[in-house]
Image (cartoon, rainbow, N blue to C red):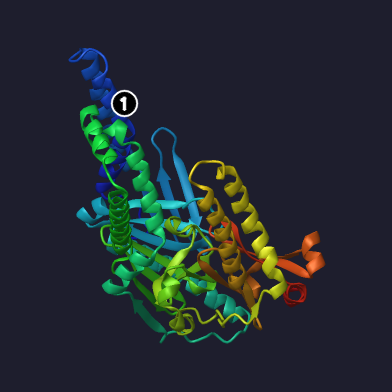
Amino acid sequence: MMYEPKRQHPAYILSVLIEQIRNIIIPIIILFVSGDKGSIFQYLFAIVLVVFPVVSAIIKWYRFTYYVTEDGFRIRSGLFVIENTFIQKERIQSVAINAGFIQQLFHVVSVRIETAGGKKAEGVLNAIPKDEALALRNEILQFKKKKIDEVQTSEKSEPVDESSVDFTAKVDFKKLVLAGITSFEVGIAFAVLASLFSQIEDLLPNSVYEAIYNQIQSFTYMMFFILFLGCLLLSLVFTTLRYVLKFANFTVHRKESQLMITRGLFEKNEFNVSIKRIQGVVVEEGIFRQLFGYATIYVEAVGMGDSQENGRHVLHPFIKMKHVPEFLTNFIPSISYDAISHRAPKRARKSYYSWSILIFLIVALAIVLLPFVQFWALGLVLIGVFIGEIRYRYAGYTLLDRTVILQSGFFSRTTAIIPRERIQVLIGKQSMLQKRAKLKSIYITILSSQFGRTYKVKHLDEKDVNRMIGWFS
């Protein structure tokens, strides 16, 4: 059944149609707003703009077929130019299953087939039944497992019995709410809200805008402060709701050597990550989450990754730091984790201070001549000192037998856990100023998503960086 050519569910027509209408909605509006109303040309052109996407979507659905062979996955598509895509099963790194709002209405899902080194998903099915999507994923996973077993047998290595390995972790609603509140996205939402307010003159009628403007002019400082708090609260509610919807029903399940990650309420997402393909683990502690002792765990894996998370997969959105070692032991036993044992030396403090103070000093000098801002200009320099101290305190590393752990950060504290066999490039850099202070910076690059990702820690002790170079070489 899986080896016969198939077409997608007709819901694919609707999804393509919506996407095409989204691209032509502005020309249609301009067409009817400008020109002679009721002219035959307007109506004929509008009919063409509406009919063409419908016909195009139907033809695309009809010409799109896919099927699974013994060793690969094939897609045949194209409107005027026929395109044949063949993906070998052994090159497939992950199969992601998503279900948007329209797909859920028709009880179908979309499938993204991703390979190592691809700049985009090589195979995308926008609307197929979920049981068929799961069968496709199982077909690929079974093939890859069979290949791994064959390699182990040929190398006469003793296979690890993982048949009984079965771990599951979930995140409840209360933790998701706290995660949304402590996420730093409130600043982004507040910036978007401020941008919308700056464009309010173009959005509202002149009479309404003038009434609002006159009312605001009569505000006292206390009323402005209350308005600011109200906007901040609105941004907080928006980002919290967005976070809860994004990670609702979050579950990570390990079965043998596969991690299955599901999340989402209106848009349901399923990610499949092979433990053997994980290049590293990142533990990120936001500045507010540190107050409660929580963090987010990401995995760096070969393949496309999650575009919403900068090419990384969220392994756990909100976990107590004290539970991280046990969690990693259960879900990624190949990753060794330990606390940071070596910090940047005290003589590195001025190196961290210098750049932060210099940047904020330049900004302060640029605005110091403005009226009523002299005091705030001095405050900017103090902010530079504060940021420099944070960066200094965050910098550190731990060197284990087969793993290096780097920690650095700005406001968020980032801890990268990288196995030695996954390191692509390790570089120690030293400037003239660092050489005088016997300091050195470490840069480690791993293969992640479609590009390499580099983690670094600046101004470490020269001997420590040299030790890491010797450990890797």
Q: Residue at the spot x=22%, y=12% of the render?
A: 36
Q: Is residue 445 left or right of residue 330?
A: right
Is residue 358 something one can see in this rendering? Answer: yes
Q: Amino acid at mark 1?
A: Pro
Q: Are there few (<14), some (14-19), or many (20+) residues within 10 Å of tag 1?
A: few
Helix, strand or loop at disc 1? helix
Q: Residue at the spot x=37%, y=57% of the render?
A: 186
Q: Position of residue 441 (x, y in %)?
A: 71, 66
Question: Foreground: 144 or 36?
Answer: 36
Q: Position of residue 55 (x, y in %)?
A: 27, 32
Is residue 62 positioned above or below 100 on the image? Answer: above
Q: Residue at the spot x=51%, y=60% of the render?
A: 303
Is residue 457 positioned above or below 165 on the image? Answer: above
Q: Residue at the spot x=65%, y=54% of the render?
A: 358
Question: Foreground: 125 or 146?
Answer: 125
Q: Quadrant of residue 138?
A: bottom left
Q: Quadrant of residue 434?
A: bottom right
Q: Position of residue 143 (x, y in %)?
A: 46, 69
Quadrant the C terminus occupies: bottom right
Quadrant the N terminus occupies: bottom left
Is residue 7 something one can see in this rendering? Answer: no
Q: Is residue 455 left or right of residue 323?
A: right
* Residue bearing the label numbered 1: 27
Question: Foreground: 327 or 421?
Answer: 327
